[in-house]
Image (cartoon, grey):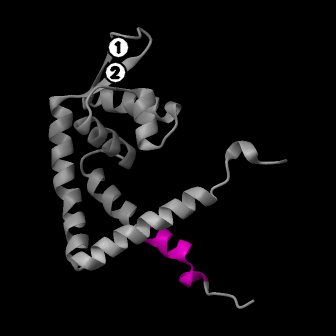
Amino acid sequence: MTEIPAEEYLCTRIRRTEQALMAHHEAVLRGYGLTMTQYTVLLTLSRENGMSGAQLARSCGVTQQTMASVLTGLQNKELVARETSPVHSKVLIASLTEHGRRVLDGAYQEVVVLERALAESFTPTERDALCELLERATTVLIRQTPDPGSRRG
């Protein structure tokens, strides 16, 4: 079997791209006092305001414990407000505050610059092909990820 140099592995290339994307976003968001997860929560609430911590955790791909901490931080910064659900008295519903919307709008205006730059670096055909290839790669990665409950020890 011929060894492929590590820098040519598809997973290595995907990881490098993801690291560059995260480094950009983190640098931009730091100027707004936000982490990537906090930004994602604000963005999610801007699209569907009034969500529980559990809903936000699922939507953002983090645990409920992590989301509880993130929401507390956002509430302390007055970026979100939380009120008791009218349906379940033990559930708190998070909503974006006006201050949160202003902070998100500012951060989004800077983050979207990268999106535009990336889009402009490809022809429409190349962009469509890249999106399709990334979707296919994501599907394979998800399919190949072992279920944590299926591990034998």
The quadrant where residue 55 appears: top left
Amino acid identity at mark 2 = Ile
Amino acid identity at mark 1 = Ser
Determine which residue is flagged by label 1.
85
Query: Magenta segment, which residues?
Result: 6-19
Residue at left offset 71%, top offset 91% = 2
Q: Is residue 55 above or below residue 111?
A: above
Residue at left offset 67%, top offset 48% = 147
The quadrant where residue 117 appears: bottom left
Give the image location of residue 83, x and y in percent.
31, 15
Label the magenta part by its dominant secondary structure: helix
Q: Is residue 14 above or below residue 56?
A: below
Residue at left offset 17%, top offset 37% = 101
Q: In which quadrant will I find the N terminus?
A: bottom right
Q: Which mark is residue 105?
A: none
Determine which residue is flagged by label 2.
93
